[in-house]
Amino acid sequence: MTTFDDRERAHEAKFAHDAELNFKAEARRNRLLGEWAAGLLGKTGDDARAYALTVVSSDFDEPGEEDVFRKLAADLAGKADEEAIRTRMAELRLTAREQILREI
């Protein structure tokens, strides 16, 4: 093995680790968003948890986060505007990432 091979393997491992971390943080953010939205919709308990899972699964519709935004915007019409939803998405992205990093 050469030093170059070792560096390449280390870079690939870091890339894979970062991709996994980002995936987990996005899923966590979406769950937290779902819990927030469930509260705005008056859902509690099992209904709130089930709704949060629908928000998580909505992220698999297409790449990026616009699919999640569209779901929340439709569900929260009259309860939260675009700015409130996007602000909450950004805040919870940071919260989710911090939570995931603490778990490592």
Image (tube, rainbow, N blue to C red):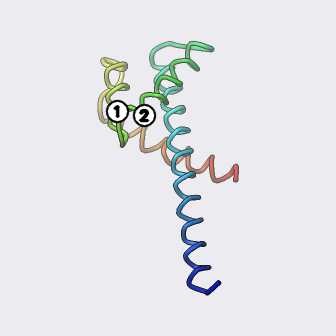
Q: Which mark is residue 59?
A: 2
Count the marks: how many? 2
Q: CA distance from mark 1 to mark 2?
A: 6 Å
Q: What element does badge 1 sit on?
A: helix
The quarter of the displayed image where residue 18 is located? bottom right
Instruction: Classify residue 44 as left or right of residue 65.
Output: right
The quarter of the displayed image where residue 87 is located? top left
* Percent x, y of residue 72: 37, 26
Q: Amino acid at mark 1?
A: Asp
* Percent x, y of residue 71: 36, 25
User: Mark 1 touching mark 2, by CB under 8 A?
Assistant: yes
Q: In this orientation, which residue lies closer to the viewer: 70 or 82?
A: 70
Local packing at callout 1 (Cα closer than 10 Å; few below 14, some 14-19, many 20+) is: some
Farthest residue to the right: give it. 103
Q: What element does badge 2 sit on?
A: loop
Residue carrying label 1: 67
